Image: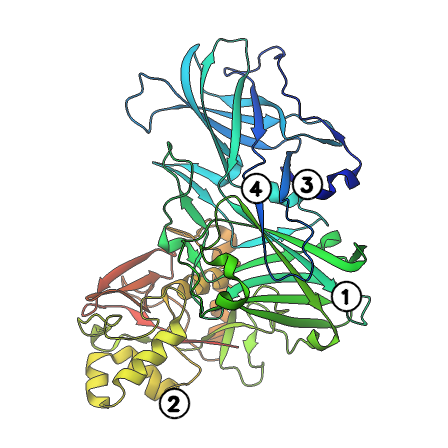
Amino acid sequence: MKKLHILFAVSAILFGSCSNDEIITEQPERKGSAPQLIATVEQESVTTKSGVIEDNDYILGEKFYWSNGDATTVLFRSPSMSNISQYKKAEYAAEVSAGVQSSSTAFNVVQADIIDNGEYTVYGFFPASAWKFVGNPMINMPANQTQNEANSMHLGAYMAMKATNNVAVDGVSPINLSYKHLGSVIRFAVWNSSDNNDLKLANINVRLSSGKAVFATQGDLHINETSLTYYALDMMVPALSLQLTGDAQNFATKEGKNQCEGYMAVLPTAANAFESSDDLIIELSFTDGTNNYLTSKTYNIGTDLDFLSNGIEQGKSYYFQLKVDNSDLNAAGTSYALGDYWPDDDNPEGIVFWVKPGSFGTQGKVVGLGEIPVPNWIWGLVNDEQAAGVAGIRSYTAGVLATRSMIAKYKGNLTTFDDDYPPFQYIYIVINDSDENGPWYLPARDELKMLFAGYSGKVYDPWMSSMPDFDSAECAAARTAFNAKITAIGGKAIGVTNDFFSGFYLSSTEASSDRFFYINLLDSSTGTSPKGNAWGMNFRWIRDF
């Protein structure tokens, strides 16, 4: 994996590596059809904002270094290119000696279009693997990240940076780019103050108590801009997850404390993402080799985390120190895996299709065994349910809130409820036995995406048009096996009826006053349909555990 070092400026000397921040001025024999690149990471933009701390020793922020093999994409635009989408492209890889910590280093051409001599405006995008160039450049940041070393080396796959410069290509001289940070870092220092010296840190989750989807997994960037100014709402998620593996899980004595550190790369949020009344919840998962433990830390945005009043800001590092003692170590409960019957094999009510990261299989989502065609092909009336006060109805992730809110609002007249909103009424009366707070609910749009990913044998990560590799032989086989488990106990398989709309399932998510979201569970595509025209569609019910 291509990596980017991240070291703390106040403690960089402890690493014992040599420094090499001098800019290279001579270019070796030219490779490929583009000039060599000298790339520098701008350091002054990375400043630390202190989170929940007992003692903050990192007010100077963090320092970033290149690693050998780091890859960047560079776009070359000449004055003759009138359309912003016109450019020549070159791919580069860093050349860094072992043990060297350098914020400025040479990048050699890996492959490139033919870059003729002349004047260009050039744009660099790092890391190359995270950027797509369809219209405006677009960065993808996984909601679920993995750290496999006891440091921040893994951040090289995630750190979003951009550079811009006007250069002259002469076939001899290298070009120079200075990269600025478009993303941010959340750093967790977890202290083990318990009596259990065998603890290992397995996972860190971050979410809001409100369940709001405020974290971006995609950012669009106008080629001339220096900040991520637009986010596709389709790619917002309510939680971020960092899985620690290998040496990253280990606690070690640092500054007199038994400490383990996790590093999570994030995209900036909207300035008003965090409301003062909301809480930030940090969930921690531990294992000691024999037992698994779960704990959470809750902090009010307004009183504890006032530094988040402007949201997560571009180029910032956010630092949390979290102390864990004996009272925090709560034993994990019954564990489930993808495809397991729930609650057990003897009395199955559904099948697990999603397991919450870091929960050791104790938390997740279950799809019920049955489905029915949408009664009268109606989702609901032409009415702005959000404006009418139905909480969660336009959420992509809060199906349980939307379902219960619809039931609470319309259950007073069951005949009208049945005629006007039949899917919600059916779940209320039939599936939840007239319990308005019953466990089963109509899934929101992205919960149907989670179902598609799960029954395709994949871990859900947001997608735009369709799930990557959804049509692979592996995914098709997983769906066949999942459906076989459903039908083996008398349930109804997903998306196998004999009509054109067999794969179309409605969600609880309102798109507008007259439309709702649906998903095709045969190919993972989503769309909207008039509320009064759900012809041929089906619906299923899910629940949390």
Q: Give the distance between the C-alpha atoms of the residues marked 1 and 2, in whole angstroms.
A: 42 Å
Secondary structure under the numbered disc 2 in the rendered image: loop
Between discs 2 and 4, the one toward the N terminus: 4
Whether residue 367 sits left or right of residue 247 in the image: it is: left
In the picture of the structure, the residue carrying the numbered disc 3 is: 9
Query: Callout 3: few (<14), some (14-19), or many (20+) C-alpha neighbours within 10 Å?
Result: some
Between discs 1 and 3, the one toward the N terminus: 3
Between discs 3 and 4, the one toward the N terminus: 3
Give amino acid for label 4: Val
Q: Quarter of the image holding residue 97?
A: top right
Q: Nearer the viewer, mark 2 or mark 4?
A: 4
| Labelled pair 3, 2 in contact (Cβ < 8 Å) | no
Is 202 located above or below residue 85 in the figure?
below
> Measuring 42% from the left and 85% from the top, which residue is drawn there?
438
Q: Give the distance between the C-alpha atoms of the residues marked 1 and 3, in whole angstroms.
A: 29 Å
Q: Position of residue 513 (x, y in %)?
A: 20, 66
Q: Nearer the viewer, mark 3 or mark 2?
A: 3
Between discs 1 and 2, the one toward the N terminus: 1
Q: Give the distance between the C-alpha atoms of the residues marked 1 and 4, in whole angstroms.
A: 32 Å
Q: Position of residue 264 (x, y in %)?
A: 59, 52
In the picture of the structure, the residue carrying the numbered disc 4 is: 46
Q: Give the distance between the C-alpha atoms of the residues marked 3 and 4, in whole angstroms.
A: 11 Å
In the picture of the structure, the residue carrying the numbered disc 1 is: 199
In the picture of the structure, the residue carrying the numbered disc 2 is: 435
